[in-house]
């Protein structure tokens, strides 16, 4: 159980931060950068939730709340680098499978794509697209961390982030479907533009 009595501790004033096992890393360490990017994705999801606003999207709000909880699990997972740590909170294949089921449920109501989608539309969809882009950045950063000598990560964490970006894309399309549809890319639209 987490219990926070004081918000500031001053322990990070020297540019280091603690992992779950008590070890300390420079705040610019790639492991802490990934945790920060996961937090940023969760924050954009929170902003998207504020913009849902329609009862038709109540199920999506529940999905997004579940995802925000999963992202805290993911942060705890990344903050526990020793893969042999007993009782460590880890992302599981079941969490990724749940995302796949939610993607399929949302996608079943959408028309097939015939063009790329611009990250635009309703405020909710636009924020979901930002969350998707940040999730992709977190995925790249986690992949880079995994490639570093001596660093280990839970492979399910990478799978979860990959699937989450897919979910956020489909969720943005679903949000836009209610408010007028996707904003599609028009290839070469700016070539003959006149001022």
Image (cartoon, rainbow, N blue to C red):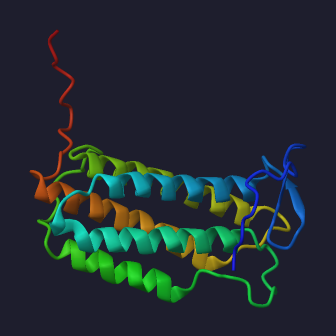
Give left or right: position of 191 versus 7.
left
> Where, by quadrant of the figure, is residue 118 drawn?
top left
* Number of numbered markers: 0
Q: Nearer the viewer, residue 106 or 22?
A: 22
Q: Is residue 163 visible?
A: no
Location of residue 65 in the rendering, given as x and y in whole percent from the top left corner? 41, 70
Q: In which quadrant will I find the C terminus?
A: top left
> Where, by quadrant of the figure, is residue 163 drawn?
bottom left
Q: Nearer the viewer, residue 20 or 100?
A: 20
Location of residue 82 in the rendering, given as x and y in whole percent from the top left corner? 82, 78
Give left or right: position of 100 versus 159.
left
Tell me which residue sits at (72%, 65%) in the image. Answer: 4
Q: Is residue 188 visible?
A: yes
Residue 171, placed above or below residue 107: above
Q: In which quadrant will I find the N terminus?
A: bottom right
Residue at the top extreme of this rendering = 195
Tell me which residue sits at (89%, 60%) in the image. Answer: 24
Q: Nearer the viewer, residue 180 or 150?
A: 180
Give left or right: position of 44 versus 56.
right
Residue at the front extreme of this rendering = 5
Residue 54, placed above or below residue 152: above
Tell me which residue sits at (21%, 47%) in the image. Answer: 122
Tell me which residue sits at (66%, 57%) in the image. Answer: 34
Location of residue 52 in the rendering, given as x and y in whole percent from the top left corner? 26, 57
Residue 152, placed above or below residue 125: below
């Amino acid at each position: 159980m987490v219990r926070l009595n004081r918000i500031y501790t001053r322990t990070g004033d020297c540019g280091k931060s603690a992992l779950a096992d008590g070890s300390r890393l420079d705040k610019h360490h790639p492991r802490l950068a990934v945790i920060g990017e996961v937090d940023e994705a969760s924050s954009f999801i929170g902003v998207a939730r504020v913009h849902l606003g329609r009862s038709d999207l109540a199920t999506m709000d529940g999905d997004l709340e579940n995802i925000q909880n999963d992202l805290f699990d993911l942060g705890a997972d990344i903050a526990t680098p020793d893969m042999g740590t007993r009782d460590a909170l880890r992302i599981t294949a079941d969490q990724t499978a749940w995302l796949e089921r939610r993607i399929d449920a949302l996608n079943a109501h959408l028309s097939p794509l015939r063009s790329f989608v611009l990250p635009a539309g309703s405020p909710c969809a636009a924020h979901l697209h930002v969350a998707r882009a940040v999730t992709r950045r977190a995925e790249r950063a986690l992949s880079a961390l995994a490639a570093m000598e001596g660093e280990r990560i839970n492979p399910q964490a990478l799978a979860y982030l990959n699937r989450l970006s897919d979910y956020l894309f489909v969720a943005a399309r679903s949000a836009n479907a209610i408010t007028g549809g996707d904003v599609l890319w028009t290839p070469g639209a700016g070539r003959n533009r006149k001022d």
